[in-house]
Image (cartoon, helix red, strand yellow):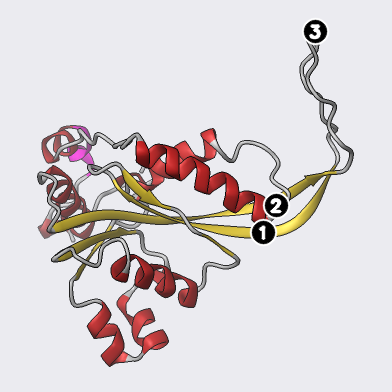
Amino acid sequence: MWCIGALTEEYRARMYALLELYARPISKAESVICIDEKSLQLIAHSHEPLPMTQHNPSKQGYEYVRNGTANLFVAVEPKAGQRIVPVTERRGKIDFVAFIDELLTGAYAKARRIHLVLDNLNTHFRRCFDDVLGKRAAAKLLRRVQFHYSPKHASWLNMAEIEIGILSRQCLDRRIASRELLESEVEAWQQARNEDKQTIEWNFTRQDADRKLGRHYVSKLAC
């Protein structure tokens, strides 16, 4: 938020709501799932890299071949240490709705309520479910869902960003030539982290926010 001169009432309200949500104890009946997506360019080597030897590191040329792009949807339940990361060709509203449908009817079919934390991308809103599924089917699918949106220009409040950073460093920091290889690598990474129940510890509170950001707050009278 370094480039934002003032934090509006809407910003504060959304921030406080997320910080309150994150402070709740873990509950199997009410799952808190943070969601985001990441686009990735598929890149192959122009020449086969030279393998590592006893006295030399592996070597690769600077030239490469572009093989298109892929999308990764990332859903992470921070306190449970569980994540689901499918690879798709695109990230349009049809793809996003299908991803949420799979979450709600699959891994979280038994949860009484599901809290989805999202940013403000245009495909993330309720109207997209109505457009894709029709209002009746959308209402049935989302009957257990409560949406929580981060403030605009505040992606740092979505813990899916943290998970994507870990995914990028541990799994995607090299050339990946095909969607099939990407799916295999991401599945192995996801399985290992889930088996280890790698959680995200969120310690930033409303009190921390007021102390660090209070000078940027816009009062109701000033709005």
Q: What is the residue that sits farthest to the right in this orientation?
A: 47
Q: Which label's residue is closer to the chain start, 3 or 1? A: 3
On residue 160, the disc is: none
Q: Distance from label 1 to label 2 (Cα)?
A: 5 Å
Eye-nearest disc, 3 or 1 = 3
Q: How many other residues sit within 10 Å of disc 1, few (<14), some (14-19) or many (≥20)?
A: some
SS class of the residue under badge 3?
A: loop
Q: Quadrant of the N terminus?
A: top left
Instruction: Decide: is 124 above or below 78.
Output: below
Q: Residue under circle 2? A: 42
Task: Look at the image and tell me whether residue 2 can be seen.
Answer: no
Q: Name the residue at 85% across, 26% down.
A: 50
* Residue 102 is at least partly visible in this image: yes
Residue type at the position of mark 3: His
User: Relative to the observer, which residue lies in front, 132 or 84?
Assistant: 84
Depth-wise, is mark 3 or mark 2 nearer the camera?
3
Q: Residue 190: x and y, percent?
A: 45, 44
Write down the region rendered in magenta: 212-216
Work out which quarter of the rendered image holds the C terminus and state it: bottom left
Q: Name the image quarter holding residue 17.
A: bottom left
**Residue wearing tag 1:** 69
* Contact check, label 3 and label 2, Cβ < 8 Å: no
Q: Residue at x 26, y 92 (%)?
A: 136
| Marks 1 and 2 close (CB-CB < 8 Å) | yes
Q: Secondary structure at mark 2?
A: strand
